[in-house]
Structures are given as C-alpha cells and as structure tokens.
Image (spheres, grey):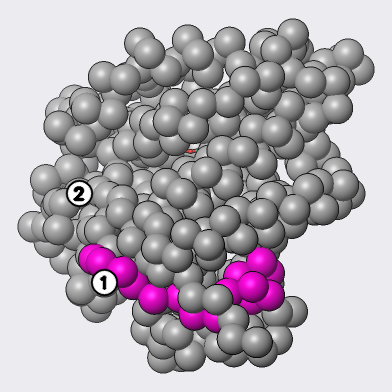
Amino acid sequence: MNMIEGHMAIEAPENVPVWDVDPYDHDILRDPFAYYSELRSRGPFVYIPKYAILATGRYPEAREVFTDWERFVSSRGVGLQDFKLEEPWRPPSVVLEVDPPYHTKTRNVIARALSPKAIRALKDSFQQAADRLIDELLIKGTSEMVVELAEAYTTTVFPAAVGLSETDSRRLVDYGAMVFNALGPDNELRRKAMAQGPDIVPWITERCKRENLSADGIGATIYAAADEDEITLEEAGMLVRSLLSAGVDTTVTGIGSMIWCFATYPEQFDILKADPKLARPAFEEILRFTSPVHSFFRTVNVDTEVSGVKIVDGTKIMCSLGAANRDEQQFPEPDKFDIKRMPAGHLAMGQGIHGCVGQVIARAEVEAVSTALANKVGGIEFAGEAIWRPNHSIRALDTLPVTFHGKQS
Ligand code: OVM
C-alpha cells in the first residue's frame, strides 16, 4: 500500500476534479477566502494530489460527512494521519478520536460536566473578569488584543473553571497549537509546534491529575463520574486533557476574531452597543464568518458514495468548515458580516455526535466579553496591522493592535 502523510494514498475517484493546491500553504492559511471560493466552485469534492485526500468546501457535503459517524469515522483520526495505519503523537482522545458505542459513554460524562446547569454558576465570575479586564484596557487605550485580552482572559477564567491548581498562559496556548497543528502534514510548522512537547506535555499531564484539581471545578465533576464507575480514573484524566486541548486556543481565537470583526465593521459594533442583548446572535455570526476551526477530517470506513462520487475505505476527507460557512447556497450574501443574521446551522462548532461539547462554556466566556464591550467601549479601532498566525486547523490571529475608545458621556 502507498502511504502519504500517514494515510493510504488513494487515487482520484472518477468524476472528481484534481486540484493541485496546498491548503496548508501559509498564504492560504492566513487569508483563505479565495481558496474557499474556488474549492466550492470546483465541485462537491476535489482531489488534492499533494496529500492524496478529498476536500469539500460545500455546506451539504461537509454536513453529510460530519453527521454520518458510521461511514465517516473519527476513530481513525480527525487529521491527515490514519490511526489504523500509524501511531499518533499522543494517546488518542477518548472523546474526539473514538466512535460509538465507546464515544457515547465519555461524551455523556463530559457533556454533563459542561451542561448549561453546570455553566450557569460560572457566569457571574466570567462577567466580573471581563468587566475588570475591559476597564483596564480602556484606561490603557491601545493594546495587543491577542495577548492582552483574548489569551489573558481565557487562560484566567477557563483554567479556574476547570479547577487547575496552577495556570500558565503560554503553555496552555502552545499546547492547543500543538494539538491543532498535529492534524496537518508533517512539515516545518508541525515540527516546530511539536518541538515544544518535552516542555509542555508533562506539564499538561500533571495538571490533569485529580490531586491537582480543586474540589468544585469541572475537572472534579469528571473525576466524580469515575467514583460512580461510569468511566475509569484514567479516562477521567484523559477527559480533563480534552478540556485543556480543545478549550483554550478555540476560545482565544473566537475572542480575537470578535475584536477583529468589530474593528473591521464598526457599524456592526454600533448595532451591538445599541442593544447588548445581541451578544449571542453576534457571536453566532462571528463564528460563521470567521470559523475559528477552519477544517477537520473524517476517515471513510466503508466503500461508499456521496453526491454521486464513489469513495473508497481509507479515504481522508478534509471538511473545510470555513468554506462551508461561506456557501452562498446556504447563507445568502455569505461575505456580509451581519450580527442580526442568526445563521442557523453554521458548522463552526461542527455538527452531529462530535459537535463541540464545550460550546456552552465557550459562549458564556465570549458573551461576557462582548457584553462588557457593548456596555463600556465606545469604539474599536485598528492601531496597526492585524496579522494572522498559520495553524493547520485554526485560523488564529497572531497580532491584533487595537484601540478601545471610551464612551462619551
Ligand atoms: C480532545 C479534543 C477535542 C476537540 C478538539 C480537539 C483537536 C481536541 O479531546 O483532545 O482539538
């Protein structure tokens, strides 16, 4: 068998256009919208020879692949590597990188620990943290919002909610970068991220231990499920690892992209200021418009057919969530940023049994920040060039110099 990037090197299926593009090219990772548009226009799927994969940027196909977990499995990895053929860099996630029936058990435990009821208790502390930080940034005037707002806020409130006994902003952010870069090809970007493993991985593993978690956090709730024999103690530690893998860079990116959206479309920030209750629909549109997680894979686990295309077992399908969220067949005027759109069914948090299990806490974190912005900030203005940071799965800002103007009163 011919292998490429840890999976079977399939041939182009019949009737599928071959597109000699590199979706991991840094120019595309930084500014993907022309790529997204061409990906959608070439067909329901394209074959990318550089990685011998199929890719889809159309909403119906991306949704079908994400929804049908029986044909399109996660247990063979959600990146380029096929875990059936190659060993992954870390023990697979017990919730992301598994299928039912096993998945159902771990998903239920983590879903309960992150339920609306569990998160409600955190809202006031999120709002206080957001209010305090926005007050400070208003006094400062101009700040680099990735580090000083998005990372500072998320790496304070989220580890506290999980119950970590110690936090380290840099290690948490860089662990996320490892996890998300690991899904892409074995190139310089991935190797650079992975080189931090010896420093970061033991630290993360230590943070996940029961004795290093507070008695009243989300981590403790997960460990309590082990006391009830729902999961093992080892699985509980692995689920805490999932929280730290998926819960930092995603939210940091969501907050950074929110500031970027409001600096780019000030009239939309004016609409939010006039009605701070729009914080929730505004975030849905920010998710659709920016797609913090730009892509995830599934592995075809049976010879099958989608949209008339015959696809063989072992095929890796790259689902471009960022492209699907700009599909004009699904979202009229997709390139228009409109916080009142209420884009039902966007794929930014996935869909189906693997849909983001942390979305309640993510929304609570981000909405506390947007509420503070709406209540306190008069204007959001770029103070320099926004620079994007290439990552194999996340479209993240690297540098975001922005001025917060006070409200005239
Ligand atoms: C995990 C996990 C879950 C969701 C996303 C993610 C790739 C990781 O369980 O470790 O990032």
| Quarter location, residue 188 | top left
Q: Say whether residue 197 is left or right of residue 1.
A: right
61 versus 70 height, above or below: below
Q: Say whether residue 372 is left or right of residue 116.
A: left
Residue drawn at x 25%, y 76% is 37
Query: Between 30 and 45, which is closer to the camera in this rendering?
Result: 30
How many numbered marks, from 0 up? 2
Query: Between 170 and 306, which is closer to the camera in this rendering?
Result: 170
128 versus 17 height, above or below: above
Residue drawn at x 77%, y 42% is 114
* Residue, disc 1: 33
Amino acid tagged 2: Tyr
196 versus 324 height, above or below: above
The reply to whether the magenta stretch includes residue 73 is: no
Distance between the alpha carbons at the discs numbered 2 and 1: 13 Å
Magenta-highlighted residues: 371-385
The reply to whether the magenta stretch includes residue 378 is: yes
Residue 24, numbered circle: 2
What secondary structure is marked by label 2?
loop
Amino acid tagged 1: Phe
